[in-house]
Image (tube, rainbow, N blue to C red):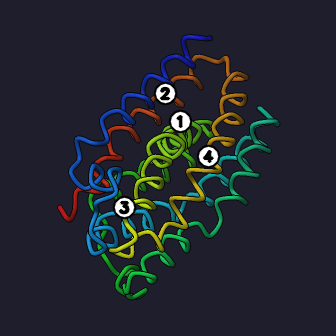
Amino acid sequence: MSSFLVEIDTTAAALDAALTENAILASLMDGTIAPGAYVERVLAPIFHYTSESSAWLWRSSERLKEQGRHPGISEHLAQKSREERGHEAWALQDALALGARADAIRAASPPSAVRDYVIYNEATCRVGSPLAILGTSYVLEYVAAHSGARAVERLTARGGSSGVARALRFLRAHACDDVCHLEALRRALTSIFDPRDQEAVLVSAEVTAKLFPRFFSGPE
């Protein structure tokens, strides 16, 4: 395994291992989170941080085409863009299942970490390396495939009486699908050899890993 893949795996695994240091995420993963906290502290941030993902992936794909580089990765990003389209609606539907109002979720001010994440990825997909988005994608899909799967299992077992178990469409879909997505993404990463591109991917992964736990820390 190349040092590049080792480094990005290390970043993702360290984030995954540290998630329970966040009280909200700890309660999510042990299945004890209250419905109100799940809506306000988990689903609302998810809605906001996923809303632009499809556009970023598409824009990065198009820039690779314009540059005449990595046609395989360009197609991978275009496919991911199509797959990610509308996923924020799943988070919104889960929130509505627990009594939230759609207008309140849309109007809620996301935590500053979510705003920083949006600004960073918007900039990289427009003027940075179009491969940088792969670092963000890898970290998020790693977490979904590992901690996300554990959270769904425990919420299903322990969240029935609170109603949370009926609001798991977003988490369940990503916990399942991102196992395969992670494998495809790793194959894409093995075709990146330029040190500058590798650095862009790694920095993107590190930024996302730094910001992600703060998505769920409440208003700042």
Quadrant position of residue 183? top right
Marks 1 and 2, Cα distance to the nearest angstrom?
6 Å
Marks 4 and 2, Cα distance to the nearest angstrom?
19 Å
Marks 3 and 2, Cα distance to the nearest angstrom?
37 Å
Foreground: 64 or 140? 140
Question: Going from the N terminus, do you reach mark 4 or mark 2 first?
Answer: 4
Q: Can you tell which mark lies on residue 135?
A: 1
**Residue identified by numbered label 3:** 158
Question: Going from the N terminus, do you reach mark 1 or mark 2 first?
Answer: 1
Cβ–Cβ under 8 Å for marks 3 and 4: no
Q: Amino acid at mark 3?
A: Arg
Quadrant position of residue 95? bottom left
x and y, in percent, of residue 106 in the image: 40, 80
Foreground: 198 or 83? 83
Note whether 89 is above or below 123 in the view shown.
below
**Residue identified by numbered label 2:** 202
Quadrant containing the N terminus is top right
Q: Amino acid at mark 4?
A: Asp
* Direction from residue 128 to residue 207 in the image, left or right: left
Q: Amino acid at mark 1?
A: Gly
For image coordinates 37% across by 86% down, the residue present is: 99
Q: Secondary structure at mark 4?
A: helix
**Residue identified by numbered label 4:** 178
Quadrant position of residue 39? bottom left
Question: Going from the N terminus, do you reach mark 3 or mark 4 first?
Answer: 3
x and y, in percent, of residue 55 in the image: 62, 60
Marks 1 and 4, Cα distance to the nearest angstrom?
14 Å
Marks 3 and 1, Cα distance to the nearest angstrom?
33 Å
Foreground: 182 or 116? 182
For image coordinates 56% across by 21% down, the residue present is: 196
